[in-house]
Amino acid sequence: MEPTSPFVNESNGKMAGIISYFSIIGWLIAYFAFYVNNRTSLATYQMRQTLLFHIVSMVLRFVVAAILGLVWLSTGMFSLYSLMNIVYLALFIIWIIGLIGAINGEKKAIPFIGDAAQSIFSGI
């Protein structure tokens, strides 16, 4: 039986992939608005990648902030602040690579985590 939603078409799979890159809220919007009724292989691929990216990004931000906070409180060193900026820059570059792949409609893995996301979230 064909879904009766007016939003069901191939371009919505691409749109779900693009929107999912814009924060975890964007991922939830893409999942419920575009993905649930229109599961294309491209949307599935992008949704898996972005979910793991958002999780890794949040964990890294908290871990780096906690480590830097402890080091700063114990030693007063501000030089490790550049480490935090390097982590954020790396996350931004990975995000851009993934977003460009989603915009082009490619199944291009995000560096470091793209392949793992496909196996970890195979149920999506």
Image (cartoon, rainbow, N blue to C red):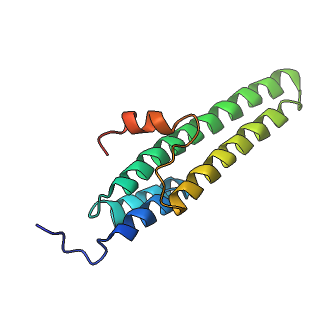
Residue 14 percent location from the top left of the image = 43, 63
Residue 15 percent location from the top left of the image = 44, 66
Which residue is found at the position 82% from the left and 21% from the top?
A: 74
Left or right: where does residue 96 sit relative to residue 117?
A: right
Which residue is found at the position 31% from the left and 74% from the top?
A: 7
Which residue is found at the position 54% from the left and 55% from the top?
A: 101
Residue located farthest toward the left when viewing the structure as drawn = 1
Residue 63 percent location from the top left of the image = 64, 31
**In which quadrant of the rendered image does the N terminus lie?**
bottom left
> Which is more toward the observer, 14 or 71?
14
Location of residue 38 by image quarter: bottom left
Q: How many marks?
A: 0
Residue 18 drawn above or below residue 118: below
Which residue is found at the position 48% from the left and 58% from the top?
A: 25
Mark yes or no: residue 29 visible: no
> Which is more toward the observer, 41 or 50?
41
Residue 103 drawn above or below residue 89: below
> Which is more toward the observer, 109 or 49?
109
Location of residue 62 by image quarter: top right
Residue 87 drawn above or below residue 97: above
